[in-house]
Amino acid sequence: MYTPAPQVPQGVITFGVITKGTTSASLPVEYSLSDQGSLQYSLDNVSWQIFTSPLTLTALVAATQYTVFAKAVNSAGDGAVYTFNFTTNAVLPPNNSNGQYSRGKVTVSNGSAVVTGISTQFLSAVQVADQFTVAGDGVLYDVASINSDTQITLSVPYQGSTASGVVYTIARYFTFPDNFPVLTQGDIETPTILTRTIRKVQQKFNEISTPIGGYMLIGDGVVVPAKWTLADGLNNTADLSSSAPTGTKYIMRVL
């Protein structure tokens, strides 16, 4: 009886959708026939090892390109070698604990209030009224809503140039009750944040320097109506020059 000589594996290897992280990956592998004794792989063609699908790879290096070599093997020898290339994920910037959030990158469009994140986690890291800025843009925008992990909406449309994959930061911690951003070592875009803070401080001074209605009690109960501001201090002499002699002591009651 004639017995044909055994053949090396004749099937075809196909690769599925890889699931990868910074230091590991999982790759589904299918073989089209059943003439194999085993499936073997080599990472970067260094050494061959038996595996079953999915192929699990560990101890990888972040942001590094790898090539997987795979083949079917039986007693007659090795089948054809198939390859699959992939790159491990990069290590994301930290979810800053120094008052800012700047993980991943963002896409912004001129005239649109919607900011789209890339590898961001807005839902857990950002709140309404936090302050967003694109690196180098010089303008802060208040966050109006957090729509998803990868999308926020600003309180006004973005006025800068349309750009994709840009560095950004979101100021998240503020003083109470005036809501000035808290800056710490490692923060970025500090000139932009400080400029807005200084403007807010100036606005606060302007508010408390608005004239306040009141009256002066002078000498023997003579009442002189007056307007007073914190900028005037307690020497509003213009209101008193025609009503009291030089050196008269007076007090103010603010209404």
Image (tube, helix red, strand yellow):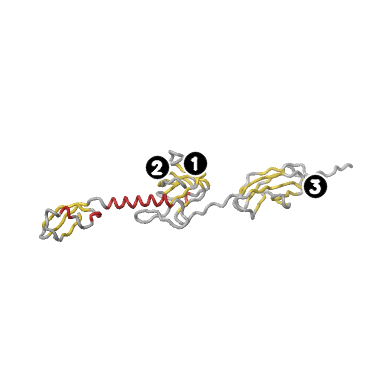
* Tag of residue 207: none
Residue named by callout 1: 163
Residue 169 in the image: state x and y as whole percent: 46, 50
* Tag of residue 156: 2
Q: Nearer the viewer, residue 72 or 214?
A: 214
236 in relation to 18, above or below: below
- Apparent side of residue 244 relative to residue 29 in the rendered image (left or right): left
Q: CA distance from mark 2 to mark 1?
A: 17 Å
Give the amino acid at mark 3.
Answer: Gly
Q: Nearer the viewer, residue 21 or 217?
A: 217
Mark 3 or 2: the one toward you: 2
Q: CA distance from mark 1 to mark 3?
A: 54 Å
Residue at the location (73% across, 46% down)? Answer: 71
Give the amino acid at mark 2.
Answer: Val
Residue named by callout 3: 77
The earlier-in-sequence mark between 3 and 2 is 3
- Apparent side of residue 23 relative to residue 41 in the rendered image (left or right): left
- Residue 155 placement: quadrant: top left
How crowded pointer 2 is (Cα within 10 Å; few <14, some 14-19, many 20+) is rated as: some
The earlier-in-sequence mark between 1 and 3 is 3
Q: Secondary structure at mark 1?
A: strand
Quick one: which residue is furthest to the right in this view?
A: 1
Q: Secondary structure at mark 2?
A: loop
Q: Secondary structure at mark 3?
A: strand
Mark 2 or 1: the one toward you: 1
- Apparent side of residue 129 relative to residue 42 in the rendered image (left or right): left
Q: CA distance from mark 3 to mark 2?
A: 67 Å
Residue at the location (52% across, 44% down)? Answer: 165
Residue 113 in the image: state x and y as whole percent: 43, 41
